[in-house]
Image (cartoon, rainbow, N blue to C red):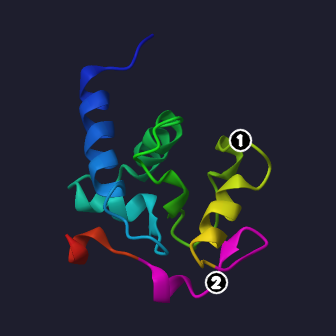
């Protein structure tokens, strides 16, 4: 069962949006999906983030769920790497949830 060509193209489009998330800001899987005209594909964006393991050009740690929870943290090496990467950018995280989420949320629909 391989990855379909359409999925590969979608994943690359997801990565292009994710690469533009500014340092110290975060967005959600759903916001990326919506910006790509695929509003119901938030889960597919999550799969794309999981599949980009090892690509240092894609800041997957800046993509969280719609409530600001680090739902993808188990896909990062080490137990707290996603949180540590965010905190190194000045993002406050308490119990796997981003603080002041509305304030640091980056919406690709309005920013791109």
Question: The N terminus is located in which quarter?
Answer: top left
State the residue at coordinates (47%, 83%): 104
Q: Quadrant of residue 71?
A: bottom right
Q: Residues within 10 Å of mark 2 (few under 14, many from 20)?
A: some
Circle 2: element type: loop
In-image side of 10 versus 22 (left or right): left
- Write down the residue under mark 1: 77
* Residues shaded magenta: 92-105
Circle 1/circle 2 CB separation < 8 Å = no
In-image side of 60 versus 34 (left or right): right
Whether residue 5 is situated above or below residue 108 in the rendered picture: above
* Magenta stretch: includes residue 18: no
Precedes in sequence: disc 1 or disc 2: 1
| Label disc, if present, on residue 99 of the rendered structure | 2
Image coordinates of residue 44 in percent, x first then y, are 41, 42
Circle 1: element type: loop
């Amino acid at each position: 069962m391989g990855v379909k060509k359409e999925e590969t193209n979608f994943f690359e489009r997801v990565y292009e949006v994710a690469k533009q998330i500014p340092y110290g800001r975060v967005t959600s899987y759903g916001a990326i999906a919506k910006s790509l005209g695929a509003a119901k594909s938030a889960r597919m964006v999550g799969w794309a983030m999981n599949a980009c393991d090892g690509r240092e050009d894609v800041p997957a740690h800046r993509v969280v769920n719609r409530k600001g929870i680090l739902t993808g943290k188990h896909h990062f090496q080490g137990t707290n790497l996603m949180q540590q990467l965010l905190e190194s950018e000045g993002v406050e995280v308490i119990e796997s949830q981003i603080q002041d989420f509305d304030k640091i949320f980056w919406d690709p629909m309005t920013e791109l």
